[in-house]
C-alpha cells in the first residue's frame, strides 16, 4: 500500500505504495515523520507468482491544518466490487514497471491525480486479498 499526500485541489497480492507532494513548512515535518516511520520498520513482503499483482495508493492531503485520507467509492457499473469504499488502485497491467507504477497509473485513472503531483513516502506491507 502506498501512502500519498497531494493538494486539496484535486484475490491477489496487494502491494501498497506511499505517495505525497514535495512538502514545505509544517508539511515537511509530517512528510518526514511518515517517511521515517515507514523506513524504520521491517516491511512484510509476499513473494509468489501464483497471485495476481495489484497495488493501491493511500492518498493523504492537508486541509484546514488537519491531514485526511482520501477514499473512493466504486461505481455500480463495474463487474466486481460495486459500491465498495476503497483506496485508489487495482490490478497491474503488463506495461507497469512495478507496483509503484501500478498504484500511480490507477490513481490517475480513478481520481485524475497526475504522477508529477505525487511523491512516494514509503511502502506498507504486502497483503494477500480475496477479490
Image (cartoon, rainbow, N blue to C red):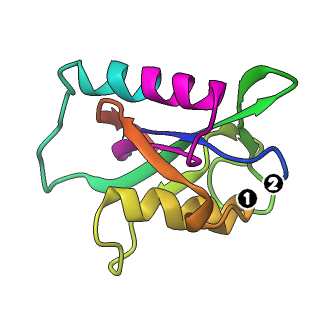
Estimate how packed mark 1 is, as few (under 14), some (14 to 19) or many (20 or more) residues with alpha carbons within 10 Å.
some
Q: Tell me which label, 2 or 1, sits earlier in the chain.
A: 2
Determine which residue is flagged by label 2: 10
Image height of 55 relative to 94, above or below: above
Residue 62 among those drawn in magenta: no
Residue 118, percent from left and from top? 56, 54
For label 1, the SS is helix
Residue closer to the observer: 26 or 118:
26
| Separation of marks 2 and 1 at Cα, in angstroms | 8 Å
| Mark whose residue sits in front, 2 or 1 | 2
Q: Are marks 2 and 1 in contact (CB under 8 Å)?
A: yes
Determine which residue is flagged by label 1: 111
Place residue 11 in its image quadrant: top left
Residue 103, percent from left and from top? 47, 56
Q: Give the extent of the magenta segment.
A: 12-33
The residue lying at 20 percent from left, 27 percent from top is 44
Residue closer to the observer: 30 or 24:
24
Answer yes or no: is residue 17 visible: no
Amino acid at each position: 500500500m502506498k501512502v500519498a499526500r497531494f493538494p486539496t485541489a484535486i484475490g491477489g497480492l496487494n502491494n501498497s505504495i506511499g505517495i505525497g507532494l514535495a512538502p514545505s513548512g509544517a508539511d515537511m515535518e509530517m512528510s518526514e515523520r511518515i517517511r521515517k516511520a515507514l523506513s524504520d520498520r521491517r516491511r512484510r513482503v509476499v513473494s509468489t507468482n501464483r497471485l495476481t499483482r495489484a497495488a493501491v495508493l493511500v492518498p493523504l492531503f492537508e486541509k484546514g491544518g488537519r491531514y485526511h485520507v482520501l477514499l473512493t467509492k466504486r461505481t455500480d457499473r463495474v463487474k466486481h466490487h460495486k459500491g465498495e469504499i476503497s483506496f485508489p488502485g487495482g490490478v497491474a497491467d503488463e506495461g507497469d514497471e512495478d507496483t509503484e507504477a501500478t498504484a500511480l497509473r490507477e490513481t490517475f485513472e480513478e481520481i485524475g491525480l497526475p504522477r508529477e503531483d505525487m511523491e512516494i513516502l514509503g511502502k506498507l506491507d504486502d497483503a494477500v486479498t480475496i477479490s
